[in-house]
Amino acid sequence: MDTEGTHDSRGTRSHRVPRQSAPVVPPRPQSAPAQGDGGAAAGQAFLTWLRTPRTEAEPGIWTYAHRPKPPEEPDRTPGRQLVSGALIAFLCGWLLWSLCWNGYLGSYWLWPLFLFTPDSWREAGGEQMAYVWASYIYYGLFALLLVVVFGRLGRLPEIWRRYGARALHRVWDESSAPQPVRPQSDPAAWPELRETGAAAVADRLAEEARAGRMNDVDHARIHRAWQSVRARPGRLEAFVDTVRREGAAACAHPSGRRDLPVRIGRHDLLARQVRIGAAVDDLRNPYRYRGTGFALDPALLGTSLLAVGPPGSGKTAQVVRPVLESLCLQALAGQAAVVAVGAAGAGLAPDDAFDVVIRIGQPDSEYDLDLYGGTTDPDEAAGVLAEGLLGDLAATNPAADIRRAATALAQLLGPYRAVHGRFPSVPELRELLDGSPEALGELRTALAGQATQLRELDARERQSERPGDVGALLADRISLLDRPAFAGFFDPAGGARLFSLRSLEHPLRVRIDLPERGHAEASRMLARLVLAQFTECAAARADRSLFACLVLDDATHTITAESLRGVQRLRSAHAGTVLTLRTLEDVPEALRTATLGAVGCRMAFAGVTTWDGARFAEVWGKEWVETRDVTNRQIIADEPFTRLVHTVRRLVTGRAVTAESVTVRRVERERWSASELAHSVPAGHAVLSLTTVRGDHAPPLLVDLRA
């Protein structure tokens, strides 16, 4: 599947779930050209979204219409204190002016007037009109002096900067006429196409946008196709012809879809972000993040995300589903490939949002999962399968050695493939691992003349006779998949029905439903297998232009030492994972700290235990802060009069007279302690830290996931 080519398909018409807040995504395209005011309104909404500025910001900040905060003022006076001080200064100035004007302070304030004016002006028959003008000028200068003095005392310049100038700019912006947008700077005019001489194509796309026939997925998809054309100029002619013929529907996804049937998140495909909440205006959050929207994008997910929280804390609804929805939209735009794994009925996303839905254990499932990951190398298939079968036992059971298990499987998979041209099905593999004489005899007979494969089979038979052989443990684990409920699944001869993760080079949307209710152990084993296959296949891709992501809802007993090493390798492979856990207790004790260290984005939801909080606090480290220690010391007077005054104060206030001393120190303190994570995070909130693939990071932040 190649979205860079041209496909003759039409977008489907769908409807969006209504939201309370203002929409931040353009409307969906119509199957036919829009007519009347409705199409013009839709086009204007799309153009407004497209032209909204997106500024460079810190990792995790929602850049849509984001305005950077002004520099922090550590000694900033609170607004209430500032206004009350200005009011008091005004009243004092007005009182002084009233006392001077009404003569209560005598004529002292008029001495400068008497000093600089001739006495003849004040005498009868003199220049009295000149004295009147001089008097009014002096009154004005004196009033101006009072305004300056008391204005400085009342901090009027700071009030003007904080409130007056801001209000004036807002009124000016609202009253000023909108400036015409130049084609060279208007993203809706496709200036990059015009620079290469494809002005006709740019005009066609601009007309589609104005008429309301283009949406954010169309824009992102065509922009992605244009980037591929720039990398391969030989595709320019085909690109121009396709856009002229199909307009906004050009270069469509192989499924023909141009949008998802339902959206619940707030997405910005221009920045490839999905908003998950807002940073709380709290002193524990850095100043530049307070009150800003919070979002995730592939640059962050490329370091992998781990979310830990009890059931009902919002992991799936507030994080997993919006992120999965964003990745599906990016897949439709030809920018990503996504695989979602969860229990059947988990509600990750509707079936229409995916190209491939694998319902393991359901007879009506249209697709099947390849246990061997689509590889033809027996050693590679054995290593991945051993990780899935015994990965959870490697830390606790000495007999569950992954290397020995991979060797044992390779000694059977290689000879079987040499004979049949494929790997064995689950029942066939179970018979071979059990050491069935009939199965091994048939395989030996078919291998006549292949000395290398016979040597492998002989070695397996000799090892199976030793006590503690790993083959018996492998047979016991594979028997979990050899159940009537899984009949017809995991068949290597499934043909087109069989899906493997080798397809991650295409913009696919895949969902795998695990039979968690009736086959919990088998589901965990399959989840480990999918994780192992994903880390292997994503890193082995020849074309890494697509961002590949595995969304694993509930990674209980899935994380192993080898899978953590695979997750770390994904950073350089333009891929990542999203993992959720109810508690870190679901990870082997030896791997709990390593699990937090292997991922770049960590989330602790409300309700985590103090034990989990201690792990997060250890990973997030400490910071230098200023602490203020206030000490009250009782004053003991020696003078009789002072003692009398202190006695009266104690009788009036009920407290002894004390002197306050303040000590300011710089100390090293945990960013978030285990107790704070367990007891101070409100419901619907989470504390998370972020790291991008380039190394930029955001410290632990308290985020409201409902904002």
Image (cartoon, grey):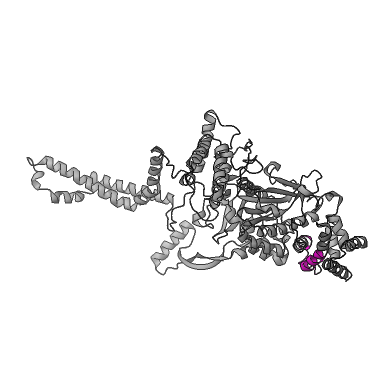
95 sits left or right of 308 in the view:
left
Quadrant for residue 20, please give it. Answer: top right
Residue lying at the far left of the rendered structure: 125
User: Would residue 359 be visible to someone looking at this image?
Assistant: no
Left or right, 409 with reference to 311: right
**In front here: 355 or 377?**
377
Q: Residue furthest right?
A: 438
Image: magenta residue range: 388-411
Q: Is residue 392 magenta?
A: yes
**501 relative to 28, above or below:** below
Residue 318 image position (x, y, % from top left):
64, 48
Residue 212 % position (x, y): 54, 35
- Percent position of residue 27, x then y: 57, 37
Depth order, front residue of 628/639: 628
Residue at the far top: name it: 36
Residue at the (55%, 49%) spot, across then down: 234
Q: Nearer the viewer, residue 447 or 217?
A: 447
Give the number of callouts.
0
- Residue 211, percent across and down? 52, 34
Judge whether residue 233 is colored magenta.
no
Residue 199 visible within the image: yes
Q: Which one is in front, 283 or 221? A: 221
Compared across the picture, whether 615 is left or right of 78 comes to right
